[in-house]
Image: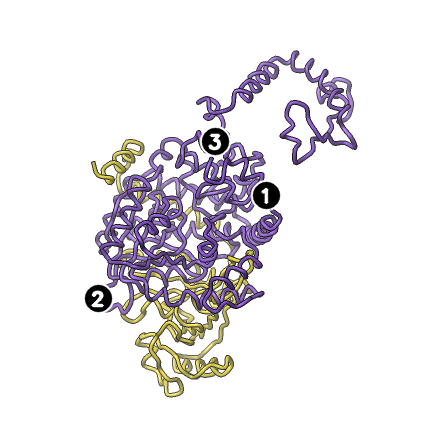
Amino acid sequence: MSARHDIFSALRRLRPQSHSEAAIAAQARDLARAMQDCLPPLEFSDLVENFIARVTAEKVGASVERAADWSNLPEAVARYAETHGLAKEAALQPDSRLLALDWSEIRAAPLTSDTMMAVGAARGGIAETGSLLFHSGPEAPTLYGFMPLHHIVALEARAIVARFEDYAAQEQGQPQPRNVNFITGASGTTDIEGVLARGAHGPRRLHIVMIG
Amino acid sequence: MTTALGTFKDRARKALGDKTLKTALDRTTGNARVKRAAAVAAWPDFDRARAAAAAIKDHALAHFPHYLEQFERNALASGAKIHWARDAKEACAAVIDICRQAKAKTATRSKSMLGEEIGLPDALAEAGIRRVETDLAEHIIQLAGETPSHIIWPAAHRTREDVSKLFQQHHRDHLLLTEVEAMVASARHELRDDFFGAEVGISGANFLVAETGAICTITNEGNAELTTTPPRVHIVTAGIEKIVATTEHALQLTRLLVRSATGADLTQYTTFHCGPKRAGDRDGPEEFHIVLVDHGRTQMLEEMPDMLRCVRCGACLNHCVVYRKIGGHAYGGAYPGPMGAALTPIFDGLEPSRDLPHACTLNGMCKQVCPVDIPLPTLLRDWRAKSFRQGFESPALRRGLALWALVASKPRLYRAALALALPLLRRRGKDGWIAALPFTPGWTQSRDFPTPAKKTFLAQIESGEQA
C-alpha cells in the first residue's frame, strides 16, 4: 500500500471524523477568538505611533522617517544614500506607485547578489510588531527584500493594521499569493553565543519611509 | 542511547568535564533565558495565551486527517507536488529522487530539524549532492563536521573563539576575526554565490496551513527566502504534525513560538510559501515539492499525543538544568533536552534510548516555559515506567527499587529503617554535607548529599517541634 494510504488509515483510525466541516470551521474560529482575548497589549492606541515605536525599538532596529506623499520618496532615498556614503544607485521594485515617481536623482540598477541599495513598496504593515507586509507578484518580486545590503521601503500609514488577526480577516476568501512576507527589521542572527549581529544574509539596514 | 561515541553516560561525563562547552552553553542559554523572561513579562496574559495556543494545536490534531487532506488539496491546486513518506528512509529517498530529476549538483539548505531527524545530510552526501547549509549556525557546524546541539542554536556548543578559528581555516579569505559582526559578514560573503548557483533549495516548515495549502517558514537571517526563491526547485520537508487550520492560527502560534525561542516579538522573516512561480513572477522556483513525513507521528498520536503540539521553540532546552550542563550532543539524537528525551525513544526505540528520560531532575521547568503546555515531566516519567515494565533496567536497579517499594509501602517498617539509617548517615556528614554515600557511590561522584536532620519529619511533628 502507498505511504499516503497508510498514513491516512492510521490517522482516520485514531481520529475518526465526528463533526461536520462547518462545525470544525466554527471551532477553529472560536479558538482564534479565544486567543484574541489575551493578546499582548499595544503600547500606543495610535497604530502609526505603535508601528514606529516597535520597528525602531532596539531589538528590531529599523529607522523610520515621515513623508507627506509618494513624490518625497526619491529625495528621501538620495538623502539616505548620502548619509550612509552610498552611490546614488538603487534597484527599484517594479511597483507601479514607485515607478511613476521622478527618479532623476537616483540611477536605477538591476537587482543582483551584490546590490547595495534597493527601494521597495510595502503592501501594508502590522502595528503590533512593526512588521512590513509584502505579497509576491509581478510588482513585488520576493528577492527585493532579501538581496540588498540596504532596504528602503515606502509604507502608506493608512495601510497599517493593528494585529495579525486584522490581516487574516482582510485576506479571508482572497486568493493566496505565492509568497506572503512579513519583514520585521533588518536581517540578524544570534547564532554565535546568542549575541545579535546584523546583516546575516539579508539586508543589514532597513529604513522605512512612512507616507501620509 | 549508544552511538559511535559510546553510551549516554559516557558522553554526559565527557561533556561535564569540558570547560569550553560550559562557557558556550552558559552564554547562549543565559542570553535566551533573559530575553524570553523580558518578552513574557511584557505580556500580562501570557499564561492564558499559552492555554489558547495549546488548544489551537490540539484542535488541528483532533481533526488531523481532515486538515491534512484539506492541506493536500489546496497545495495541489497551487501547483505544488506532494510526496508522502512513512519513515526517514522514504523521506530521504523522495528528496534524493527530486534532486536527481532536477540534475542537481548543489543543494542549498535552510535549517530544518526534521531534515536532521530523517538523516537528510547523510543521504545527500551518499547521493553525491553537494549540500550547502545556509543558516549561520548550520554553516558553522558543517565546517566543523558536527551535528546540531540545539534546535534553535545548532552551534550553541561553540564559543566565538571556536567560530573564529573555523572561519579562518575554511573561508576563502582566511581572515582571523575577533568580532561577531565580522564573522557574520564573512559567512555572508562566503555563501553568497551558492545561493544563486544551487539547482535545488531545501527548507523545512514551521506550519502547514490547511486553508491555503501554504507552508510557513520563520527565520531571522533571511537565508530561508534566499534558499527557496532563486533555485529552480524548492523542496519542503515537513512532519505532518505541523498542520494548522488557518493562517490566523499559524500567526497566533508564531507569537508564542518566537517569544519563547528568542524573546523577540516576531522573527525578522515570517514567510508563507504557496506553490511554484506564477505567470508574471520575476522570481520563484519553477517546481515546488512538499515531502510530508510521518516518521513516528501516527505512533505518537496513539501513545503521547501531547508531544505533537511541540512547536520546536527550544525553551525547554534553555531552561533545563541537565541540558545546560551537558549540552545537546550528549543526548545522541537529533533533538536534545527535555523534548529530545521525550521524542528520541519514539524514533530510535526505548531500549537504546532509555537513559534519556532518566537524565531529568523532574523540576518541572520545561513544562512551565513550554508555550503549548506539554507535560514533559509526565511524558518522561511515563517512559521510565515503561522501560521498567519492559525489563530494560539493570537487575541491580530492579532489585533496589523492589526493596524500596517493599519498605516504602509499609509505614512501620519504613520508619524503623529510617531510624536505623539516620544516625549512620549523620556520622558520615561533615559541615552539613556527605561526600560519599554508601551503596550508591555514583550519586556522590560529582556532588554532595546534604546531611539529614537529627529526627525525621514525622518524629519532629509528633514531639511538637517547629520544623
User: Of tags 1 and 2, which is closer to the observer?
Assistant: 1
Q: Please, what is the three-letter code of the amino acid marked with disc 1? A: Lys
The spot of residue B83 in percent (x, y) is 25, 47
Q: CA distance from mark 3 to mark 1?
A: 19 Å
Chain B appears in which tint?
A: purple
Q: Earlier in the sequence, mark 1 or mark 2?
A: 2
Residue reaching furthest to the bottom: A104
Residue hosting label 2? B279
Q: Please, what is the three-letter code of the amino acid marked with disc 3? A: Arg
Residue hosting label 1? B325
In the rendered view, does B463 fall on the left or right side of B37? right
Q: Earlier in the sequence, mark 2 or mark 3?
A: 2
Q: Which chain is yellow?
A: A
Q: Please, what is the three-letter code of the amino acid marked with disc 2? A: Ala
Above or below, comparing residue B170 to residue B14 in the picture: below
Residue hosting label 3? B354
